[in-house]
Image (cartoon, grey):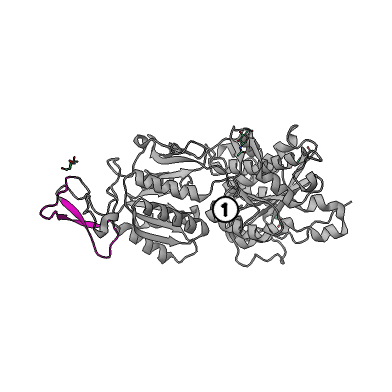
Amino acid sequence: MVCNRRANDDLPSVFEDGDIILGGIFTVHLDANPDIPSFTTTPTGTDCESFHLSNFRLMQTMIFAIDEINRSKTLLPNTTLGYKIYDDCSSSAIASKAALALVNGEQELIEYPECKGSSNVAAIIGCDISTSSIAAARAVGSFGIPMVSYFSTCSCLSDKQEYPTFFRTIPSDDYQSKLLAVLVKTFGWNWIGTIRSNTDYGNFGMRAFIEEAQKFGVCIAYSELFYRTDPADKVTKIVRVIKQATTKVLVGFLHPGEMRILLKEFLRQNVSGIQWIGSEGWVTEDLLPPEERAKFLVGTIGLATRRTEIDGLRDYLLKIHPSRFPDSFFVNKFWEAAFTCSLKADNVTEQTPSAFQMQQCTGKEQLDEIKNAYLPAIMDGSSYHVYKAVYAVAHALDDMLSCEEGYGPFMNNTCAHISNFEPWQLLHYLHSVNFTDRTGEVVYFDANGDPVPTYEVINLQMTLKGTVEIVNVGYYDGTAPLGQELALNVGDIVWSTVDNQIPPALCSEPCPPGTRKVSRKGQPICCFDCAECADGEISNITGMYKRGAEYDVIVSP
Ligand SMILES: *[C@@H]1O[C@H](CO)[C@@H](O)[C@H](O)[C@H]1NC(C)=O
Ligand SMILES: *[C@@H]1O[C@H](CO)[C@@H](O)[C@H](O)[C@H]1NC(C)=O
Ligand SMILES: *[C@@H]1O[C@H](CO)[C@@H](O)[C@H](O)[C@H]1NC(C)=O
Ligand SMILES: *[C@@H]1O[C@H](CO)[C@@H](O)[C@H](O)[C@H]1NC(C)=O
């Protein structure tokens, strides 16, 4: 029988049938046309712009993982997984509609109950940015459909009252924010600037960072925010503030989209010498051409999720070619974006004038000859997070399979059946998943659906060839005993300063012996003057304050 699939698939999607279908939501294009988030117009394929090569890799990683599980004789034997994947074009409105489209199979179910397995997804792998996950998790939460995100880090998503079915394989920013504050304290800074993306990611992440930093007595010299669609003069003003500030240390909680815009303005105003402390959102991204990266970003310290190579993934990615997937909208777009050429068959849909001047793709282009975000020399953590997300769902399904009737976890010790289960039953298994993946990492979720946090502390350093390299200078392991989670090699760090010394970032120099701190009215506690001690008082320690005075809260630097 032919199952009638949903008719309103207006957005580009890829589908492969199976006994159980996993939904996927990825951000393959970065810009959605403002008027498309309707599911009512005919698809033209030109609606979303800015094809993102590394996000396309993430989408392919999901397919790779499903392929691998399908071939496995031990994981889900005799059950094939299929997929239905949407591109949300970086729009939270599209993300929530795509999520609804993935769970919505009711119409067909009434007419063709046999079709249930193939029209409803068991779980959704996604979304990309937090704002999209928030929208999608709200949309599908009431259906009980599990979502496992590979990229959304907003701590807000740990709230299980709000997002009961949300899981993720990337750690919550809660840890990241705390860790960035610990780094600032460790380097002895108390006078820093902050900048963030005006998004859930930036706002929640920065708020937690500032809270944490203030506990360490760190003061915020300035705090700026913007979003990529803000008028250009806003960014101009922000960079002027950064340029004129009395601190060179700048903590940035940003998406690559905003960081790219900001750096463009840095270049224009020629602001160098900033000591960046960066969130995992942008520090490992290739945001500038090599020479400019060297000038503006060397010395950057930041956090990155663990970079892991997955055996076989690189070969799989190299084999993707339009001739193997002639009908695939995404593969064709990918080829054109990777080689800046135009595939003949696509000239119907491509309406931008510049495309007509673009040369034709020959089909003989070689993926292994280009160096770009699709296949970086060292894979960042994102592919691995997608891979883990797919495996977590597969293991949950597999655990469901191994249930023994009479000993099951559900009412009257019953089991769920893989051919016909309720979403909340899979949710139950996902909560208790616990396995060691192929890279040797143990995967499980805490009560909030969060993974154990692990990070690399990275530093952007100049190589002898003049290129900038990401160097690992520390490691954070959430499973280590209390107090031993963070290991840092401060001596290995290259700083942004000309003499390669830790740049000072203090509002006031500590008061020398014989003097004490006097706070300045209306200024942060890190800014003070030093006054001679009065008769009968002594201070023989640097950074001494007067006992019992109102400004005693100062933490001595
Ligand atoms: C899953 O496995 C089946 C049978 O081996 C295969 O036909 C199908 O193409 C596979 N699907 C994916 C997504 O790998
Ligand atoms: C695409 O372009 C080729 C030549 O560049 C042309 O021959 C062909 O007719 C075009 N296809 C369509 C559908 O317009
Ligand atoms: C996961 O399984 C291992 C081995 O069976 C066990 O030692 C560990 O405590 C489990 N972890 C959790 C969080 O359940
Ligand atoms: C400061 O003076 C006190 C009291 O005389 C003394 O006990 C302490 O060791 C001195 N500290 C330093 C750093 O000299």
Q: Position of residue 412 (x, y in %)?
A: 80, 46
Q: Residue at x 27, y 49 (%)?
A: 556
Range of the magenta residues?
515-540
At 22% from the left and 52% from the top, the residue drawn is 545
* Label 1 beta carbon within 8 A of ligand 3: no
> Does any portion of residue 363 appear in the rendered image?
yes
Q: Position of residue 186 (x, y in %)?
A: 35, 43
For label 1, the SS is helix
Q: Which residue is more in the foreground, 367 or 15?
A: 15
Q: Quick check: is 496 in the magenta stretch?
A: no
Q: Quadrant of residue 387?
A: top right
Q: Is residue 275 left or right of residue 486?
A: left
Q: Horizontal placement of 71 versus 431: left or right?
A: right
Q: Residues within 10 Å of mark 1 (few under 14, many from 20)?
A: many
Which residue ends up furthest to the left in the rendered image?
Answer: 535
Does 534 appear in magenta?
yes
- Residue under label 1, please give it: 158
Residue type of the residue flagged with mark 1: Ser
Which quadrant contains ligand 3? Answer: top right
